[in-house]
Image: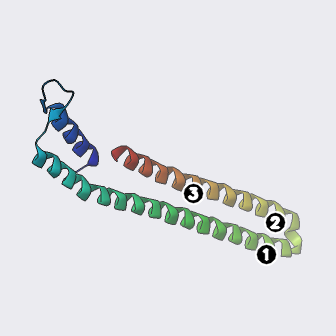
Amino acid sequence: MDVLVLIDKLDDSIHNGKPVPLTDQVRVEREEIYDILDQMRATVPEEIKQARWIVKERQEMLAEAKREAERIIREARDQQERLINQQEVVRLAERQAEDIVEEARSREREIRLGAEDYADDILNTLEVNL
């Protein structure tokens, strides 16, 4: 059960408690409160576990995006080197290699930002649910 639902149940139990005359206190059913607290104790660790999993997934996504970006840049540099070594197309090779490196950087940024946005959305959703 969702922790927020349990908090609402606890709030309802207190709100619907019988007033104690001449005080600002209310009487609540002890077993009902203990039952809600037990459910909360069971639910919170699972939600924390889910949050940790999401954080781990986010870190893995960012690491994968970084590895992919580094691979793309490495390939771009390798291609740049091959093109430069060809005497007939030195100028063309330099331009193409620069374009490839810039595209790789752009893709790296897109991948990284996309992964961060996705992970942040998941974390925000989880935070709202907690």
Residue at numbered disc 1: 82
The mark nearer the N terminus, 2 or 3, is: 2
Is label 3 in a helix, a strand or a loop?
helix
Instruction: Name which residue lies at 27% across and 48% down.
Output: 3
Which residue type does callout 1 highlight?
Answer: Arg
Mark closer to the observer (2, 3) = 3
Residue at numbered disc 2: 93
Is label 1 in a helix, a strand or a loop?
helix
Residue at numbered disc 3: 111
Count the labels in the image: 3
Q: Residue furthest top?
A: 22
The mark nearer the N terminus, 3 or 1, is: 1
Asked if disc 2 and disc 3 are in contact, CB closer than 8 Å, the reply is no
- Determine whether 126 is above or below 10 in the image: below
Name the quadrant containing residue 47: bottom left
**Callout 2 crowding tier (Cα within 10 Å): few <14, some 14–19, many ≥20:** many
Asked if disc 2 and disc 1 are in contact, CB closer than 8 Å, the reply is yes
Image coordinates for residue 13, horizontal then vertical, percent: 16, 37
**Callout 3 crowding tier (Cα within 10 Å): few <14, some 14–19, many ≥20:** some
Instruction: Name which residue lies at 39% across and 57% down.
Output: 51
Image coordinates for residue 20, horizontal then vertical, percent: 13, 29
Instruction: Name which residue lies at 72% across and 68% down.
Output: 76
Instruction: Name which residue lies at 10% across and 42% down.
Output: 29
Name the quadrant containing residue 46: bottom left
Image coordinates for residue 62, horizontal then vertical, percent: 55, 62
Is label 2 in a helix, a strand or a loop?
helix
Which residue type does callout 3 highlight?
Answer: Ile
